[in-house]
């Protein structure tokens, strides 16, 4: 039965809001886990990055992401229908959602502009009660912040790895501007945050072992602050991310995530949708007891509540990111504040977001009390202790990037979804149990890869090759395997400066010309050597004088014939110049 009133839900943010698909996900299992609302109770309008709108369709037909399960649970709780507007864009930075920032050249608009223009259109459908829909309350759901944890936004493209990553204050300021602009134009009752999950690259070793990627990162810390500062109109309404795991990791939330350990499967989207619907309903319901019950102060791992008086080690070089929240999430009076001292002046400080920092030169072992207070009356004090600087973490600092494409298990999706492959124009390929077979043309990484003589880098390919294979190519540079050089079969590296390096190796092919290869081409900057290894054993090398570089826009372009490639791993250090 069609409801009399439809509440509007705008779903904004990036891939986990848009409902990103993964080629490695079993479609049959996803269909089995899908839930859909009753016909006529929920409708959806999809809006592309270029502000192109789909036809309005009944969500009973299904959709990736949270929309179907959200609409179903909302109808069960309220008896109202849902009109879902999907404006989220996979991979979008918060700059694309900030008023006046980072507009697309093609449209002159950013994704907030798209959303506000679409809101005007949608509201016209129920204008003055004479339209096709009778609208009730308006909400938006925000899920964003994964990509910016390791990528740097350069105005119109991502730089990977990022050196100048967005900090908590920059994220919070932009999010606050987004929220204010939305509320200024649209009568939103509540903005609901689907808390961002930490990406593998920014997670501690212990978190990775547990499969719980909860570590406190700037975007997450900023979202907790937004919850505290704008509690009347903006709340974290789902923390499912803190239990979500892949199928291979047992425990609550197992199977919520895909094999990339970043994006949700249908099972996870359903859980997120239920959590959002139920907590939003608790927030708006006059029957809800909204009395604050406790104050939770989260340690830097993002999941462990700290206790009164406990010692908190604080890296003397990096500080410690923490966050606090009044519970339950729908409680009244969410405001909190942090203070350091006594004895903190010139020694230790804590900012409005909960980052604790010791002054340079503070002796290791120095202890200072730090307190968080909630306006509702709760308070908690821990003892910050100046700890030795941890060894530089190459992954966390964004100096080294490790891209892995395992075609047998993940198709064209990069292991951490940081640099997925896209088929080139008219590319013909086939995914096989043992890898991929590409007959014509090439695959393109989402982000250009770079190498240089100024730092170490490494490229590994593994599989059965039936012909010459161009592993990588760009405008000038390329890397070919199984080509005939001056000393027989070799790997040939042609640089952007038109320099050519050949590293010979022996091919033991079968009667069909196929050869199993596990080759690594590496550059050692200190020794200025290009090294070719097979199965971890060095087989040839060449000394390199002078400058060289390479930029690669295409991967896996065969010069002739077809081949199967199982895995390609590339470690590239970004040129910091």
Image (cartoon, grey):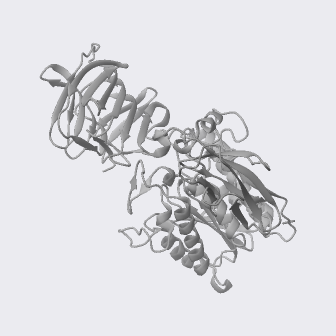
Image height check: is 39 above or below 539? below
Image height check: is 420 above or below 37? above
Residue 36 seen in this snapshot? no
Q: How many marks?
A: 0
Residue 159 seen in this snapshot? yes
Question: Left of 220 or right of it: where is 330?
Answer: right
Q: Position of residue 436 (x, y in %)?
A: 39, 32
Q: Give the residue displayed 48% in from the left and 60% down from the top.
A: 93
Image height check: is 513 above or below 146? above
Image height check: is 204 above or below 173? above
Looking at the image, the residue that sits furthest to the left is: 486
Classify residue 9 by image quadrant: bottom right
Question: Left of 525 or right of it: where is 21?
Answer: right
Question: Left of 537 or right of it: where is 70?
Answer: right
Classify residue 379 by image quadrant: bottom right
Q: Position of residue 266 (x, y in %)?
A: 63, 47
Asked whether 294 or 507 is in front, the reply is 294
Query: Which quarter shows the N terminus?
Result: bottom right
Q: Give the residue displayed 42% in from the left and 68% down from the top.
A: 102
Asked whether 572 or 121 is in front, the reply is 572
Q: Position of residue 29 (x, y in %)?
A: 62, 39
Asked whether 450 or 110 is in front, the reply is 450
Q: Give the residue displayed 20% in from the left and 39% down from the top.
A: 495
Q: Position of residue 79 (x, y in %)?
A: 79, 66
Classify residue 43 by image quadrant: bottom right
Q: Give the residue displayed 45% in from the left and 74% down from the top.
A: 100
Asked whether 357 or 117 is in front, the reply is 357
């Amino acid at each position: 039965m069609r409801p009399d009133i439809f509440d509007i839900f705008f779903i904004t943010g990036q891939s986990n809001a848009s409902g990103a698909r993964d080629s490695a996900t079993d479609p049959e299992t996803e269909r089995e886990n899908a839930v859909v609302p009753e016909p006529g109770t929920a409708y959806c309008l999809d809006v592309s990055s270029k502000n192109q709108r789909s036809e309005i369709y009944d969500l009973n037909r299904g959709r990736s992401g949270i929309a179907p399960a959200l609409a179903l649970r909302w109808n069960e709780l309220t008896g109202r229908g849902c009109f879902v507007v999907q404006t989220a864009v996979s991979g979008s930075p918060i700059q694309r959602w900030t008023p006046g920032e980072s507009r697309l050249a093609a449209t002159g608009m950013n994704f907030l502009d798209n959303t506000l223009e679409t809101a005007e259109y949608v509201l016209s459908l129920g204008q003055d009660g004479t339209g096709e829909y009778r609208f009730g309350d308006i909400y938006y759901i925000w899920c964003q912040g994964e990509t910016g944890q390791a990528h740097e936004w350069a105005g119109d493209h991502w730089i990977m790895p990022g050196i100048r990553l967005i900090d908590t204050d920059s994220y919070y300021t932009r999010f606050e501007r987004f929220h204010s602009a939305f509320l200024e134009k649209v009568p939103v009752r509540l903005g609901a945050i689907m808390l961002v999950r930490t990406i593998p690259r920014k997670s501690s070793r212990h978190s990775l072992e547990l499969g719980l990627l909860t570590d406190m990162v700037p975007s997450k810390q900023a979202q907790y602050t937004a919850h505290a500062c704008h509690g009347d109109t903006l709340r974290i309404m789902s923390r499912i991310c803190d239990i979500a795991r892949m199928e291979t990791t047992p425990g609550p939330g197992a199977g919520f995530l895909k094999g990339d350990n970043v994006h949700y499967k249908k099972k996870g989207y359903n859980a997120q949708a239920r959590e959002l619907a139920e907590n939003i309903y608790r927030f708006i319901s006059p029957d809800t007891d909204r009395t604050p019950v406790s104050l939770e102060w989260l340690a830097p791992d993002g999941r462990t509540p700290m206790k009164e008086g406990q010692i908190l080690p604080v890296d003397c070089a990096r500080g410690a990111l923490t966050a606090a929240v009044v519970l339950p999430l729908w409680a009244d009076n969410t405001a909190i504040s942090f203070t350091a001292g006594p004895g903190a002046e010139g020694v230790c400080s804590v900012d409005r977001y909960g980052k604790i920092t010791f002054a340079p030169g503070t002796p290791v072992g120095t202890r200072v009390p730090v307190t968080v207070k909630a306006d509702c009356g709760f308070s908690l004090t821990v003892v910050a202790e100046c700890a030795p600087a941890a060894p530089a973490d190459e992954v966390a600092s964004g100096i080294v990037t490790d891209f892995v494409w395992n075609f047998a298990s993940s198709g064209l999706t990069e292991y951490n979804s940081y640099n997925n492959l896209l088929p080139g124009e008219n590319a013909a390929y086939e995914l096989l149990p043992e890898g991929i077979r590409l007959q014509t043309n090439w695959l393109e990484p989402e982000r250009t890869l770079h190498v240089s003589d100024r730092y170490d880098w490494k490229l590994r390919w593994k599989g059965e090759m039936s012909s010459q294979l161009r592993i990588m190519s760009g405008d000038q540079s390329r890397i070919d395997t199984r080509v005939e050089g001056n000393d027989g079969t070799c790997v040939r590296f042609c640089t952007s400066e038109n320099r050519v390096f050949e590293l010979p190796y022996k091919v033991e092919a079968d009667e069909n010309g196929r050869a199993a290869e596990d080759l690594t081409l590496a550059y050692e900057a200190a020794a200025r050597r290009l090294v070719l290894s097979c199965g971890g054993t060095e087989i040839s090398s060449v000394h390199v004088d002078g400058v060289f570089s390479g930029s690669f826009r295409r991967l896996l372009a065969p010069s002739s014939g077809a081949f199967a490639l199982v895995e390609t791993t590339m470690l590239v250090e970004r040129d910091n110049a």
